[in-house]
Amino acid sequence: MGGINIEQYEESVEIEVLVSFGTTRGTKVQGSFFGKFKRPTQDELTDLLDPENDYSNGELLDKYLESVRGIGKGGNQELDAAEQLAWVKKSPECVAAGAVAFLKAFRPERYDEKTSRRQRSRG
């Protein structure tokens, strides 16, 4: 095992976000997109996980989600970058899934125990 090469450290990280959508038939449709998230500092992450703070999932994405890829219409036709980001931020399912994926990527062992109840339920 080698050391950490700080020249490979990037300010952003791409995370796959898995999403489930309900249908009118009572079934679920699943898909995923890739979000490019700003990497939080340790102090920012501690603040996000502090149960005294009350960040919504939408606030978290507004601050850390930089761009999205993988959202489009049928036939592998992706929307343009701005449309993809806007679509994710207006979809309650994508907002919730994006926040969970972000927090789990940086602190998987502490996500469930340290986020507020309101953050887990709000979009």
Image (cartoon, grey):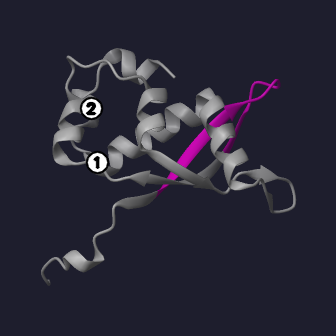
Q: Name the residue under label 2.
A: 48
Tell me the number on the disc at residue 40.
1
Q: Is residue 104 rendered to the left or right of residue 7?
A: right
- The three-letter code of the residue at mark 2 reads Leu
Q: Where 122 falls versus 13 (above or below)?
A: above
Residue 67 is situated, as x and y percent measured from the top left of the image, at 56, 52
Q: How far apart are the two marked residues, 2 and 1, measured between alpha carbons?
A: 10 Å
Occupied quadrant, residue 83: top right
Q: Earlier in the sequence, mark 2 or mark 1?
A: 1
Tell me if residue 41 is in the magenta stretch.
no
Occupied quadrant, residue 74: bottom right
Q: Give the range drawn in magenta.
A: 15-30
Residue 47 is situated, as x and y percent measured from the top left of the image, at 21, 31
Residue 57 is situated, as x and y percent measured from the top left of the image, at 45, 28
Q: Residue at x 60, y 31 (%)?
A: 93
User: Around disc 2, counting alpha carbons within 10 Å, would you say few (fewer than 14), some (14 to 19), or many (20 or more)?
Assistant: many
Main SS of the magenta part reads strand
Residue 97 is situated, as x and y percent measured from the top left of the image, at 51, 37
Find the residue positioned furthest to the right: 75
Check disc 2 and report its element: helix, strand or loop.
helix
Q: Where 2 falls versus 92 (above or below)?
A: below
Find the residue positioned furthest to the bottom: 2
On the rendered image, what quadrant is the N terminus found in?
A: bottom left
Q: How many tags in the picture?
A: 2
Badge 2 vs badge 1, beta-carbon distance below 8 Å: yes
Tell me the number on the disc at residue 28.
none
Q: Which residue is drawn at 61% across and 51% down?
A: 32
Tell me if residue 23 is in the magenta stretch.
yes
Q: Where 103 falls versus 79 (above or below)?
A: above
Q: Report the front residue among 32 and 79.
A: 79
Q: Is residue 34 rendered to the left or right of residue 51?
A: right
